[in-house]
Amino acid sequence: MKKLIVDLDGTITKGDTSDYRNVSPNQEVIDRLRFYKELGYEIIIQTARNMRTYEGNVGKINIHTLPIITEWLDRHRVPYDEIHVGKPWCGFEGFYIDDRAIRPSEFTRMSPEEIEELIAGEH
């Protein structure tokens, strides 16, 4: 099955994360996720939300954070098949490196074929 692994904060949501219950949706990304879902993609959301707050304790995140995430996703009709909490938080001065990663702006403006071509250029 074709899969998309998608970050939550700053990707599906806008960057205003002071109030997680009312964070603004990134509608362009959500619309694009709906498009990919219709193409048959499985959508997995992976998030580092509250990893710093709960010092990496995924059990506490499952209790306190996950219900807020699922309520928000459902309210904004974001398609998803799985949610993975506990993504390591890179900090304010770090970043993530992945050979199959694209930025949200590329995801919203490029076709599936263009994205595959971009990713293939990394190999």
Image: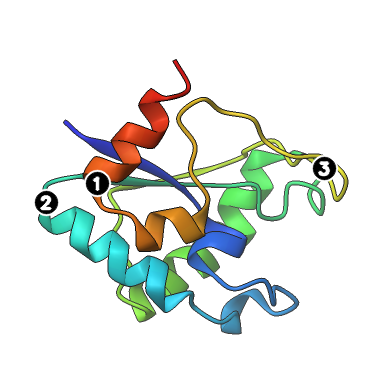
Does dot 2 land on a helix, a strand or a loop?
A: loop
Give the labeled residue for mark 2.
39
Residue 112: mark in rendering: 1
Residue 84, percent from left and from top: 48, 42
Spatial CA span between label 3 and label 1: 37 Å
Nearer to us in this view, 111 or 55: 111
Residue 52: mark in rendering: none
On screen, residue 74 above or below 59:
below
What residue type is disc 2 on?
Leu
Please indicate whether residue 66 sits to the left or right of residue 43 in the image: right
**How many numbered marks does the figure carry?**
3
Residue 4, percent from left and from top: 33, 42
Please indicate whether residue 20 sits to the left or right of residue 113 in the image: right
Please indicate whether residue 97 sits to the left or right of residue 111 in the image: right
Residue 120, percent from left and from top: 36, 24
Give the labeled residue for mark 3.
55
Does dot 3 land on a helix, a strand or a loop?
A: loop
- Is mark 1 in CB contact (under 8 Å) with mark 2? yes
Whichever of labels 3 and 1 marks the residue nearer the N terminus, that label is 3
Spatial CA span between label 1 and label 2: 10 Å
**Mark 2 closeness class: few <14, some 14–19, many ≥20 residues within 10 Å:** few
What residue type is disc 1 on?
Pro
| Residue 16 position by quadrant | bottom right
